[in-house]
Image: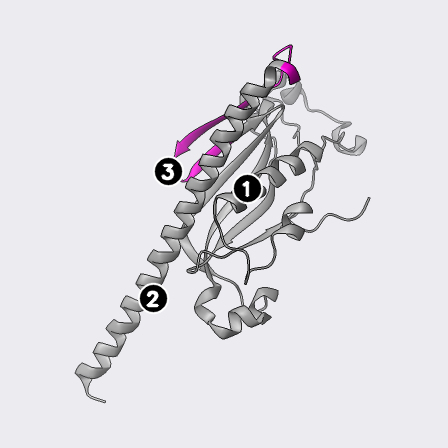
Amino acid sequence: MTENSSRTELFKTLVAKSNLKQDIYANTLNTLRLFKSVIEDMTKDFLLASTDLNPHENTTFENRYRGDFEIEMKFGGDILLFLMHSNVFEFSRDHEIMRTPYIREDKNRSFCGIINIYNFLSDSFKYNRFNDVGYLIGRVFINKENHYFIEGKRELGFIFNDFSKNEMNQEAAQKLIEAAVLYTINFDLLTPPYEQVKMVSVNEMKNTLDAISMKTGKRLGFHFQEDKPE
């Protein structure tokens, strides 16, 4: 093989990989836009239904956008943040998804864009409680064929785990968002262990309660793993 032909092959590989990642990026961004559309529709539907369901108007359902890659969805005392990463990733060789026939047929299907879904308490933002913690409740992976796979907690991880068949569209986005909201509603705030909060420093107590250095979160000591049966 001559130097020119070798270099041509190198350039072909570069262009092919670049085009693959651009296609995946476009699919992931379009998925985020689908999420935005679903969330806006849900917000409108809640406002229409709130006359009967929410007579005291003390339950909120709002959304806003912090940039091209972030959606904030606020309902009740919770916030869901949908954050799209601008880069494309591949599953590790040890990941279970790599052993599926779908990936073995075409390894390029394992390259994905990612949208992370985080749950925070709305009061954490309202009162600038910077030590409060949020929770990653799901990661949405989108590949070149616009198929999606979700690693997540309970409903999210169990329902949306067939990578070879799940194709992202308006209906899929709606089911995913509704499942995320339902999971969040049922993911209740637990009192932190007594041993963890029994001592407070003078400095912490002198600060306002809004900035006190005791973390608030639904599950302190959270690590991203499957929920254990209760």
Name the residue located 52 percent from the left edge and 63 percent from the top edge.
91
Q: Give, as a single range, the part of the protein colored magenta.
A: 52-72
**In the rendered image, which residue does mark 3 sit on?**
68
- Which quadrant: the C terminus? top right
Q: Gap in Å between the C-alphas at discs 1 and 3?
A: 15 Å
Q: Is residue 62 magenta?
A: yes
Q: Nearer the viewer, residue 63 or 217?
A: 63
CA neighbours of label 3 inside 10 A, class few (<14), some (14 to 19), many (20+): few
**Residues packed near mark 1 inside 10 Å, few (<14), some (14 to 19) or many (20 plus):** many
Q: Earlier in the sequence, mark 1 or mark 2?
A: 2
Secondary structure at badge 1 equals: strand
Q: In the image, is residue 133 part of the stretch drawn in magenta?
A: no
**Residue behind mark 1:** 117
Q: Which is nearer the eye, 50 or 216?
A: 50
Mark positioned earlier in the residue sequence (1 or 3)? 3
Instruction: Give residue 172's position: percent from left, percent from top.
Output: 53, 46
Q: Amino acid at mark 3?
A: Asp
